[in-house]
Image (cartoon, rainbow, N blue to C red):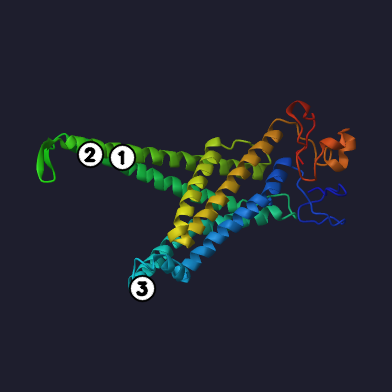
Amino acid sequence: MLCPKCGRMLPDGVPCPCGAPLRSTNPAVNLIKTLGVSAKLLAAAVLYSAVVFLGLLSLLGVGAVTSPLYYIGASGAITPEDFEELVRAMDQATGLSGILFAAPAALSAAALWLFYAACRNRKTGNVSTAGLTIFQVMAYIQLAVYCLLAFLLLVLGIFSVVSSASMPEIPYYVNGENYGAAPLQMVVGMLVLLILMMGGFCALWIAFAVCAVKTLNRIKATAATGVPDNRVPGLLTGFMMVIAVFGILYGMMFCMMFPVLGLQMLCSAVAMILLSRLLSEYRRKMTFLCFSRPTPWGQCCPAHRFRLNIPAAQSHGKGEFEKFPKARLPQRFCGC
């Protein structure tokens, strides 16, 4: 560990006499620590925690609190007794869906809080990857589920095509009138087309899960070895943004009838946007480390810029990168 204030080199776990928080001598690990305590990650952790809290509220039948508002809007078209039954059914549906929606959010919140605490720990230069491991397990489970679903769709499609060859033609009627015989192969063809569409959807989710697993493996490897790796697939960040957009749209619609579930969707969608932006920032800043020659920490930071003769206007705050244009990037760049 190295003290950013006095420059002392200290072993892990030993505080500096000057009292300043210690940093790792590895710039890639410092980048992970800096982004791990950023406002984006903290806000995402809070939002996922809010999803879990709303799921617990749905178990308590909090939808009944808003039932008077619903009754005011529907008082002219429904009796109080029927409306009470409707609200009870809505509460049951909201409670079940809220818990199902909160289960993965609870794991995501736990993973983010663990990673945030590990990055905030300045007593050691290492970064615990327990939080990333939770995300990795979730990605593997998602990958296995969609692979199984894709396999079942493939079996169903093959069975439909093979069985349609020996099926006879069947008559079809419209308003009691016989319009002739419709080949069952046409119906099977429509079914196969639907299966292909669902298979394409599963393939997209499988690609998303594979990208997530690879990205988590690379971040964990960087945290363990200190070797910078900027490979974050654009498919991962882009698909996260698409999921977030659809989550916001569905959340706004569900807020009309199921406010708790709608709020859960909105919180999860905003958290997804923040994580997507955080991964994009990680890729951009890690690229600086991959294509620059790092030097020991402190030789190009604002407090020591006189050693490299770096103008003050080109330096930024402590813990940030020197955001030079590409052609003006200094030859020696520590990444702090």
Q: Distance between the residues labelled 2 and 3?
A: 49 Å
Contact, mark 1 vs mark 2 (Cβ under 8 Å): yes
Q: What residue type is labelled 3?
A: Pro
Counting residues from the start of the chain, the first of labels 1 and 2 encountered is 2
Residue 255 drawn at (x, y percent): 47, 58
Q: Residue 80 carries which label?
A: 3
Contact, mark 3 vs mark 1 (Cβ under 8 Å): no
- Badge 2 crowding class, 10 Å Cα cut-off, few under 14, some 14 to 19, many 20 or more, is some
Provide the secondary structure element on which disc 2 rests: helix
Location of mark 1 (residue): 195
> For the point 36% across and 73% down, which residue is it?
80
Left or right: 232 in relation to 28: left
> For the point 16% across and 37% down, which residue is it?
184
Residue 98 drawn at (x, y percent): 45, 61
83 or 164, which lies in front?
83
Residue 74 drawn at (x, y percent): 39, 65
Location of mark 2 (residue): 160
Q: What residue type is labelled 1?
A: Ile
Provide the secondary structure element on which disc 1 rests: helix
Q: Which residue lies furthest to the front in this view?
A: 76
